[in-house]
Every structure is written in C-alpha cells, then in structure tokens.
Image (cartoon, rainbow, N blue to C red):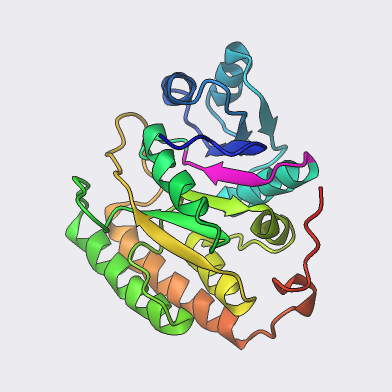
Amino acid sequence: MIDVPPKTILLIPVFNEEANVEPLLNEVRQEFPDLPICFINDSSTDATRQVLRSTLCHHLSLPCNLGVGGAMQAGFQYAYEQGYEYAIRIDGDGQHPPAECRALIERMAQGDVDMVVGSRFLGESAYTSTLFRQAGIRGLAAMLSAACRQRITDPTSGFQMVNRAVMYFFAHQYPADYPEPESLALLSRQGYRYCEVGTQFRARERGTSSIRKWNTIYYMFKVSIALFVDRCRAVDPRFDRQNIKVSP
C-alpha cells in the first residue's frame, strides 16, 4: 500500500455541514491517522463552526461567505504558506470516501502530473445521478475536452490532489463561481499537467446539495459562458508553470 507523501495536507471546504463534519473527520482519522487536516468553514449559518471547535480539529473560519471557490483559495494559500508540498481536497458533504485518496496519491507518485482529479465516470463506479445532471456533465466534459485538448470525463469533480506548483497558482488565481471546470481550463492554458483516475463516489447521506434538479442545466449554461470568457483572456506569464518558484 502506498504511503502518503510527507508534507501533505487534506483540505475540506464546508458550508452548513454540521451533520457531516464529525463522521467525515472520524473516517479520515481512521484511514490516515497522521494526515494533517484543515477544514475551511465558509461562514456557515448552522452549527458547523461549533462542531469544528468541539472536535478540536484545525480549521479556518471565513468572516463572510465566499463560495467554494473563495474557500478553497483560502485553503490553498494556507497550505502553501505552511510549506506543504501536496494538498488533497475532498468535499465536506461526505461524497468523497477518504479511502479513495489512495488512488490519487498513487497516481501523483508517478511524478508526471501537477494535479490528479478523481473521476466518478472512469472504471467501475456505483455512483448514479439524475438524468439532467448526467446530460449536463457530459456536455460540459465534451466542451472542456475540446478546449484543453485532452479527455476529461468529470469536469465538476472536487476530489483532487495538487502539487506545490498548482497550490501556489491556485492561491493567487482561482475561479470564484465555478472552480472545478474553470480551474481545469486555466491550468491547461498556463501549461500545467493533470489527469483523472477512477474513484468511487457515494451519495450524500446528510444535509442538502447546493445544486437543485432544475438548476443543473442553468448551472451548465453559466459555466459554458464563463469558460468562453476565460478563453478570451490573455495568459498571465507570472503564473506560467515554467516561471513559478515553489521553494518552501
């Protein structure tokens, strides 16, 4: 079994996940007892902050709600400034089984990519979704695959592992509204390398998803517009992969 690389941190964004924090934390600690964990509380309005305090786990509490993009940018900035070499992100709703992090770690260990994304649509997966969401994801995947010139099967996956170079880039340049698909497009334009690996996802057991059934197509439409706007912007040479200095 492959070991977790030294100086790796697990980042978990949460918003109104009071029922999921403790079960997810216990599961992570069971799978990876020595892995540093940082929850990013995106100004939750329920008891999430109190639960985080009661578990005595390390967490950042944002003073206002920034959305998942802003929360993750704060997490990446913290991980970079603390000298971590790798960061793994799983969502706070429990849909990413912590045990599946091993698939990302094993692929990252090959050393030829800067980011690994866990895809629910590669390999054997028991994950199911609504027809609306499946159609939207497939359309978005086809668009991103063409724009990035590589096959992408799960453009909305938040199950990721990044190295220090991407950590630095995301700490400075990270999409606010639709971070998962937009970040893939940005990485591709700046010369970073990434790939997908098949991982198991599971259905949310507690809490409520932020994307409703009838909002799925609208979400995909807005993402498409955002991606088009991104393609019209000039590449920022300061954050080109070849120019970034990643020493701790």
- Residue that lies at the very extreme toward the top in this rendered image: 54
Q: Is residue 149 depicted above or below 160 in this figure? A: below
Question: Where is residue 107 shown, x and y percent of the image?
Answer: 45, 53
What's the magenta region? 82-91
In magenta segment, residue 154: no
Q: Residue at x 61, y 87 (%)?
A: 232
Question: Where is residue 64 shown, x and y percent of the image?
Answer: 69, 41
Q: Is residue 124 depicted above or below 193 in this figure? A: above
In magenta segment, residue 90: yes
Question: Where is residue 220 shown, x and y percent of the image?
Answer: 38, 69
Q: Is residue 43 depicted above or below 121 in this figure? A: above
Give residue 204's quadrant in the image.
Answer: top left
Q: Is residue 159 visible?
A: no
- Residue sitting nearer the eye, 205 or 167: 167
Q: Residue at x 19, y 49 (%)?
A: 128
Q: Is residue 83 left or right of residue 76?
A: right
Q: Residue at x 54, y 25 (%)?
A: 48
The image quadrant where one finds the N terminus is: top left
- Residue sitting nearer the eye, 211 or 235: 235
Per the picture, the main secondary structure of the magenta-coloured stretch is loop
Q: Is residue 203 depicted above or below 195 in this figure? A: above
- Residue sitting nearer the eye, 213 or 56: 56
- Residue sitting nearer the eye, 80 or 171: 80
Q: Residue at x 74, y 60 (%)?
A: 172
